[in-house]
Amino acid sequence: MTYNQKHEQKYFYINVIFYFQESKDEYDALPPSITVREIYYYIVIPGFRTQQVSLITTLLDKATYSTLENVGLYGKRWDVELDLRHIKTTLGMDILRCKTPSTIRKEIHVDLLAYNLLRSLMWSAGTTYNTPPNRLSLQGTRHHLLNFIPKLETAHSQKRIRLYRSLLKIIVHKVVPDRPARSEPRVTKRRPKAYPRLTKPRHELRHQLQTA
């Protein structure tokens, strides 16, 4: 990601207000104020919505933590946003299907286990075949794993090892292109249906239709 070299820095004190539900001793141990460092910089990437950023950090030593290093590290947060998007969209966690708090927690845990399994496969494939793991496709890895699962379940131990190595090789076959500063329009591809939302149980709505 490219940033404009023009930036400003300043130091100032801020009063710290904490809202705790913990013990009074922990609250009393908090400082009344802290010194922070502000880095103000400009993003000059066409298509990006954010053009000016005010970055607040407690890393005050400019010799140890340079301005550009702080800006670059903050820019890498976008990778975290992409990972969260993968969890929600690629694995279908944007809609939770369970109904009770305990089963919802189980559903989230299982989805995170599946996500970590895919990421571990991508890491193994990338390190085995000298490919950056973050350049591999999570969706592609998911599809390849689903295709291999029936064969892995019925194979004996030696064949299973060969299948696993073949799976890693297939995962790195198609690398995602490096697309720095990529921007896409925030639009929907398909026209939404002109129906109201399902806000009641289906049996109640059926009853309303039958008694109308």
Image: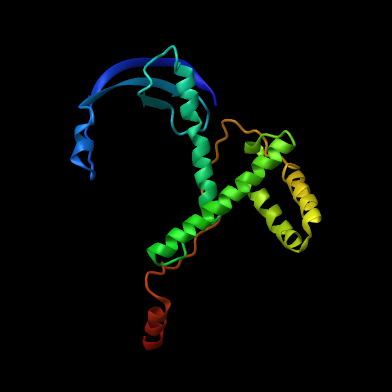
- Locate residue 102, reporting x and y percent: 40, 63
Residue at x 55%, y 40% (from the top left corner):
184
Compare residues 128 and 2 and report the one nearer the observer. Answer: 128
Q: Give above or below for 54 relative to 186.
A: above
Q: Give above or below for 53 relative to 5.
A: below
Compare residues 140 and 166 and report the one nearer the observer. Answer: 166
Q: Residue furthest bottom?
A: 211
- Locate residue 61, reporting x and y percent: 39, 15
Residue at x 65%, y 33% (from the top left corner):
178
Residue at x 47%, y 56% (from the top left corner):
108
Residue 212 found in image quarter: bottom left
Residue at x 39%, y 84% (from the top left corner):
207
Q: How many numbered discs?
A: 0
Residue 95 visible within the image: no
How are the colours assigned in the image? rainbow
Residue 159 visible within the image: yes
Q: Give above or below for 33 relative to 111.
A: above
Q: Is residue 50 left or right of residue 31?
A: right
